[in-house]
Image: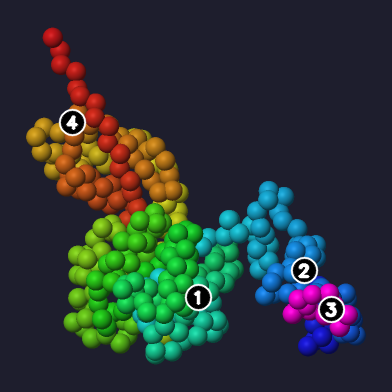
Amino acid sequence: VAALLQRTGSPVLVVANKVDDQVHEAGVWELLGLGLGEPHPVSALHGRGTGDMLDALLAVLPDEAGDGSTVDPDTAVPRDEVLAVALVGRPNVGKSTLFNRLLREDRSVVHDEAGTTRDAVDTVVETEDGPIRFIDTAGMRRRARIDQSTEYYSLVRALRAVDEADVAVLVVDTTVGVTHQDQRLAERVHLAGCPVVVVANKWDLADEEARETIAEQVDDRLGFLGGVELLRASALSGRGIHRLLPTVLDARDAYHRRIPTAELNQVLRRAQAATPAPAGGRVLYGTQGATDPPTFTLFANRRLPRTYLRYLEKQLRTGLGLEATPVKLRVRVRPSRRRT
């Protein structure tokens, strides 16, 4: 092993473990014969000598970028500037197969048995639109069914990957349909505030009835995500995978998009003309207060029912091309003045 490490040309630290006291330190110097430099005596059990070892480790690590952000070694691009795409879904829906297909290499273990992915695996892929970090997460299921500590921590790491992702790709099994667990998982991703792209995987294995049902179920059971585009694909054969990357990039652009005030109010006027608010309610005008996600402030003459706000949100998504990204609405009541 020492000879192999010497040929790599990378810095190597020799750590001598189980040195619990000074009596055992004399035997440490025999490790100089490896030709890898001075050994660092430590005791992993008691923590003895670990501070000095960490100081030596920090001394050989690469420097940070000038702005203090860590530079990704694979792309030489600051990690925060790399688009992070998390693949999420229930166990055994084909996330790892899709992950390997996107990477064009067998990076994740694929097996018919559910639960083969235990930790979030991420890899940076260079594309024409810049580097993208794809993250293969462990299959998520209800915590009541988790009976192993390893699976629990896999779930925690998967949820952390969702929170840190710029776009989430929700993978569902076409042969099974949209289950209750898919709904719960979609709600969790939606609460994270990132855009969502739904992929109906195993499309080639489903019959005609299942294919017709999956589109209806996405509209019905995942309607709270907005008018997300359903990608029909097969990760195993590669069918439809070419559409995933453009859809992800469109979702990213919509998430950061700034809508002109004139365009926003034009959509609001058309929506209210088609379906007026009940009890004389009316949106006087609207403006975009923030991005990431797009947040709109609506000034109304009175309080508007939640059902009507959901209608306006749907109209804004459709009219402004924000189908794949979450939209937030804030309403401020500004009563109209009456002439005396």
> Taking the image as drawn, is residue 241 in sight?
no
Label 4–label 2 contact, CB within 8 A: no
The first of marks 4 and 1 along the sequence is 1
Label 4–label 1 contact, CB within 8 A: no
Query: In the rendered image, which residue does mark 4 sit on?
Result: 302
Query: In the rendered image, which residue does mark 1 sit on?
Result: 119
Q: Nearer the viewer, residue 70 or 156?
A: 156
Q: Badge 2 local density, few (<14 within 10 Å), some, or many (20+)? A: some
Q: Badge 3 local density, few (<14 within 10 Å), some, or many (20+)? A: few
> Taking the image as drawn, is residue 126 in sight?
yes
> Residue visible at 37% across and 82% down?
92
Residue 59 shown in magenta: no
Label 1 sits on what residue type?
Asp
What's the distance in space between the residues labelled 3 and 4, CA to CA? 81 Å
Tag on residue 49? Answer: 2
Image quadrant where one finds the C terminus: top left
> Residue visible at 27% across and 83% down?
175
Does 55 sit left or right of 77 as displayed? right
What's the distance in space between the residues labelled 2 and 3, CA to CA? 14 Å
Name above or below for residue 168 compared with residue 319. Answer: below
Q: Badge 1 local density, few (<14 within 10 Å), some, or many (20+)? A: some
